[in-house]
Image: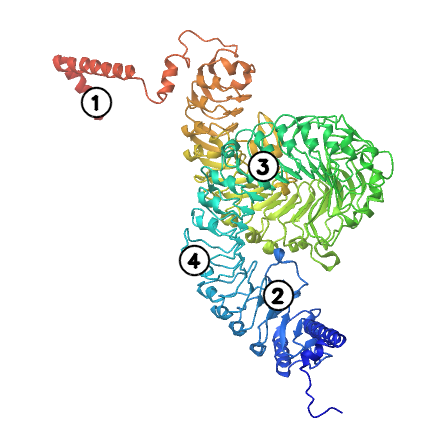
Amino acid sequence: MASAGYKASPPFIFLSTQPQVLLLLCLALMMHLTTSATATSNGNTKRGCIKEEREALLAFKAEISYHKDHPISSWGDQNDNCCHWAGVHCNNISGHVFHLNLQSNNGPPPPYYTCDVGCNEWGLSGNISESLISLQHLTYLNLGSNCFLNFSIPKLLGSFENLVHLDLSYSCFTGVIPHELGNLTRLHYLNLATNGVSYKVDDAEWLSGLSSLRYLYMDGANISGVNNVMQSLNKLRHLKLVSLSNCSMNSIPESLRDLNFASLTFMDIGSNMFDNINIPEWFFRIPNLRELHMKECGLTGTIPSSVRNASSLQFLDLSYNGGISGDMPRGFGDLCNLQSLYLDGTFMGKSLDDFKDAFSGCINQNLNVLSFGFSSLQGPLTDWLGEFRNLTILDLSSNYFYSSIPTSIGRLSRLQELWLYRSALNGSIPESLGRLSGLQMLELADNNLNGSIPASLGRLSGLTFLILYSNALTDPIPESLFQLSNLVELDLSDNNFNYSFIITEAHLANLTSLMFLTLNHLVLNISTDTIPGFQPSQIDLSYCHVGPKFPVWLANQVNLDSLDISNARIKDSMPDWFWNITNNLTFLDLSNNEISGRLPQRLKFQTEEDDSEIFLRSNRFEGSVPYFPHNIYALDLSNNSLSGIIPHDLAYFGGIRPQLNSFSLSSNNLTGNIPNSLCNLVDLVLLDLSSNHLEGAIPNCWNNLTSLKFLILANNSLVGDIPYSFTSSSQSLQVLHLSNNQLQGEFPSFLKNCTSITTLALDHNNLSGNFPSWVGETMTSLMILTLKANNFSGNLPLLFNLTSLHFLDLSHNSFIGGIPQSYGNFTGMINISMNGGAKFSTIWEVLVISITVSTKGLELQFGVTLSSIRFIDLSKNNLSGQIPEGIVNLVGLQNLDLSCNNLSGVIPSNIGRMQSLESLDLSRNELVGLIPSSLSTLHFLESLNLSHNNLFGKIPYTSQLTTFNDPSIYDGNLNLCGAPLDKNCTNDEPTSNSQADDQENDDDNDNPPLWFGIGLMSGFVVGFWIVWGLLLFKKEWRHVYFRFLDRMYA
């Protein structure tokens, strides 16, 4: 027992004398803290969640729509403790909800996220309940990647004064961003990035209230017309990151007082469109800025000299600001820490040598990425590029160097990617590229490189992409190239290999990593059924000699999703196993071979990917039209031997409407009617059923095909009127080809709204009525117009505004009246260099508009070359009057046929101006006068017919006309003489080189010459006075004359 004088030691003294106890207490405290942290992190708490907050969360759930698989669907079902609910985290001690993460992970990632009615299939949607105001202890709130379409950001979010992290990105909010968000003074992270539907900032002053903000993402928000964004952000001294790309910003201060961005390391204002302002110099005075993104902003002028102050800068992107020009400041070379530089699409038209001094400093020590493509740079590739010894990526694509690749590129020992495609390079590929041991990507496509591929490239064991297409390379291809086992893509297509190099299975066996193979103009001689280790996903052997047998080694290509063996000289029947391997394909092209066999009743294709394409045209396939998967985007079965009817349920086979965009069954043996079900293919852009044996009326059901651009039903036996339901396609329609049918009715009135139509072919039908005048007023995009062989009547319309027209055939109708003078104003026939014709993107390369024309005395079928023909045929009508003088302005016209009309007057004397004419037919008219001598200067003229007119005088048988020795081209002109006719000319016979030629040049055929008028008047005066003088002076003559008059009128 202690004495009364005993006094206990202070606790710290006691603990200091008991180290074991101290250690135990420390361990206990650590375990407690760890348990507490774990409970807090996982939302687990022994206390359970606060009742008021649980009810707030349930009220939020009640007003929100969600997919059944969304985690929020389980809230409150089996557990009342909201701290255990998905996305909810509570504080272990207080039990308050402090962390709420409701981001949807079911939809596409943000770059591909679109705000449409389908987004609610994966994200939350609906109104955000006011009950959330009860969660006042929230520090973290994430509602990103949801679907609050047509709802504004709730103002109540500005009441969460403890909020540190707020993420509303890609959630489809609309309206104005509420200024109340500026009350969140503790906020460190704010993400309002969006894509598609955009909310608007009306004033940026509220941003200055976010005094603790470090990270700001507002990409895609609409900030147009707001002038105080940067001024507000400049007040946030803790700000580290600002991302404002694609915000429709149109202004930014060129100067900024009291620069306060001391903590800023990242700035992105790319993909905006400023009003042609200069690059703000204050950007380069931000002391700690490491990354500056200003891509595609509409910036102009020179790079400011203050760039030398950006000593911390590591990444700079000024690409696609076409207005940036002038000289690069020398201070640019002092950016010693710069690692990535993107100047694509800037300094347009300059030379690389113009930048030598700017790149001569320490910038070349650390620069890893230099991208200077699409700038139309001139002059040669320079040797000083070899000084950037640390470069890993060099991109100089799409320029105009017109030089060879310098050997100094081989000194870039750390280079991993070299991009030089479409840069007008010539010469051979230098052997020095084989020293780039780390090279992974070599892109030299679309140049004019020649010679053979250097064997040294076979030493680049790390090479994964070798792209050399569209050059002038020749064989042999080095064997070492086929030892590159890391190659992922090999493209040697469109070179000058000329089928002299043979690819065997030995070449392909080592390409075990290859995914994409593209070869042209080579010979494949593969004798085995399988190639071990060779399993690419895409094979393009078009224009290779693969045949004549169908390649059996394809049967073991289990990874194949794209196959092109078109134009491969295959002459074989299709093996049965082939239709089994198509299950995984998304692209198949077997066109232009001689493959035979019956198509399966249903084409099996990969159905998980959209936009699949099948091209089987120009083979010998038989059978009926097959059904196809709903995801097929383009299907071309043209020019085969398919028979039977088009199935009436083709558009709904399997219960799913296909998304077919391009559908061609032309040049087969199909019969029956066009089924109405084709009108259910509402995504159709191209439909070609031409050259079959289809009959009946064109169905009147096209109301829903608002995207239809190309409709080709020519060369069938269709009857009836042209349906008015095509009106729905009037804004999109570009080609309407209904030739060679038995259609009737008048010129379709719906065409008045077809302002985009370029080709209208209604020839060889039974259409009648007038040719409306509005064609020249509204169909201003017309390039090809043929109404040949119908029953149209009335006068020809003026066609004033058809400046692009280059093919006009109105022959074999009953038009009357004169040829309008405006027909000499067709710009498409005046400009020789103009390449007219319907312009199709590459996806429509399968489209061939085939039209029959009469030229050079022959009926010819024109297809792919139609776009280059400049042609007028008005023959076999009832036209009268003179040939308009303006017709000679059509200096690009190649064919002019005005035969079999009632034209009168003379042939225009300056017809020699039409220097492109190859065929001229003026026969069977009532033309008079001399044959103009300028006709002999038409050096391209191959066909001429002037027969059955009233021409006279000597034929100007010189120059080009001496090539026409057939006298029948002058038949029916009885007063013509000279070669090649047997009739000789007399000395006084008028010729086009003498007095008669002067008559033509002065347009005198209808007006007598001056000497004739003077003689006539003189004779009249003399004769008059002889008669009246005798009557005046001879009295007896006067009496006899008047008695004679009395007897006549008695």
Task: Give whichever of discs 1 and 3 has the lower sequence position.
Answer: 3
Q: Which residue is mark 4?
A: 225
Task: Give whichever of discs 4 and 3 has the lower sequence position.
Answer: 4
Q: Nearer the viewer, mark 2 or mark 3?
A: 3
Res 871 visible? no
Kind of residue at badge 2? Asn
Q: Quadrant of the N terminus?
A: bottom right
Circle number at residue 1047: 1
Q: Which residue is mark 2?
A: 146
Kind of residue at badge 1? Arg
Answer whether labels 2 and 1 touch (C-beta < 8 Å): no
Distance from disc 2 to disc 4, alpha carbons, whole Å, reads 28 Å
Q: Could you say which is closer to the camera, residue 15 or residue 255?
A: 15
Kind of residue at badge 4? Gly
Which secondary structure lies at badge 1?
helix
Residue at image location 69% in from the left, 72% down from the top? 37
Dot 3 crowding, Cα within 10 Å, few <14, some 14–19, many 20+: many
The colour style of the image is: rainbow
Left or right: 406 in relation to 974: right
Residue at image location 76% in from the left, 34% down from the top? 568
Residue 745 x %, y %: 55, 47
Which secondary structure lies at badge 3?
loop
Q: Nearer the viewer, mark 4 or mark 3?
A: 3
